[in-house]
Amino acid sequence: MDFMQLLDMLVHVDKTLKIFVDQYGLLVYALLFAIVFAETGLVVFFFLPGDSLLFVAGAMCATGSMNVWVLMLLLIIAAITGNTSNYYIGRMLGNRVFTHDYRWINRDALQRTHSFFEKHGGKTIIIARFVPIVRTFAPFVAGVSQMTFAKFQFYNFIGAFGWVVSLVGGGYLFGNIPFIKDNLTAIVVVGISAAIVPVMLGAVWKFGQRLLQRGDKQKQENAG
């Protein structure tokens, strides 16, 4: 197997996971840990699969190929430590990421995540867990923005736990139903949207309320 074949299998590991389990057995735990850590901990690996990988891994646990509790624990640890690593990289680089042209950073993704972070603050760390690409850049931006470590870890733990348990657990319970297996991508997208949309709407509502309050205050000041 050459490097390009290996890279293709890693990028599409959610579709080839059974091959890895059959060939490497228990080493698949280390592989999944490494993929989740890399996707959440290193901005250059934003393209790695996340949501669908967790769901498929959960489905394979239901067949007895892996232990669901061991897998959840390992992936929660991978998600937490990955985000922590990314946070420290961002904290080390600081605001230089917005003024220097780092080839290894996707600037469009960085700017989108920064805007997202400006709107939602610490909750971004939780919400971003369910948004591909943003998931990879959110802890990096939190570090760049100098979010306190304690506050970051609070959101980091909640996000990692919710992300892993919901997707691995969902795959374990429903992943082997034929209809779901045949429409996995669409179902994962719909499920994630259903989880995020209420949070987004709540944030938009609060933002609108603040604008109204500022408008009322401005009117009062002008009247006075």
Image (cartoon, rainbow, N blue to C red):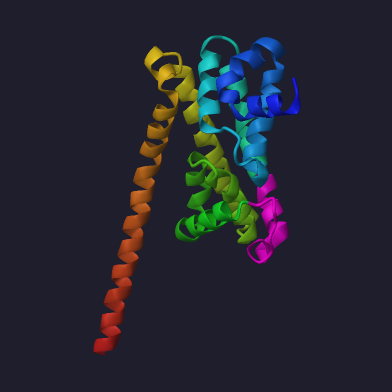
Q: Depth check: give the residue in front, 37 or 67.
A: 37
What percent of the width, then of the height, locates residue 52? 51, 28
Q: Is residue 206 magenta?
A: no
What percent of the width, then of the height, locates residue 130? 48, 39
Q: Depth check: give the residue in front, 183 or 139.
A: 183
Residue occupying the point 34% across, 51% down:
202
Image quadrant in which the C terminus is located: bottom left
Can residue 150 be seen in this snapshot? no
Residue occupying the point 47% across, 30% down:
166
Whether residue 121 sits left or right of residue 222 in the image: it is: right
Q: Quadrant of residue 179?
A: top left
Q: Depth check: give the residue in front, 210 or 53.
A: 53
Q: Is residue 101 magenta?
A: yes
Q: Main secondary structure of the magenta part?
A: helix
Q: How many marks?
A: 0
Q: Depth check: give the residue in front, 210 or 12.
A: 12
Residue occupying the point 48% across, 51% down:
123
Can residue 122 be seen in this snapshot? yes
Task: Say if 107 sits above or below 54 in the image.
Answer: below
What percent of the width, then of the height, locates residue 69? 58, 21
Whether residue 136 sits left or right of residue 171 in the image: it is: right
- Residue farthest toward the bottom in the current orientation of the protein: 224
What percent of the width, then of the height, locates residue 143? 64, 56
- Residue farthest toward the right in the current orientation of the protein: 2
The residue segment tinted magenta is 84-105
Image quadrant in which the N terminus is located: top right
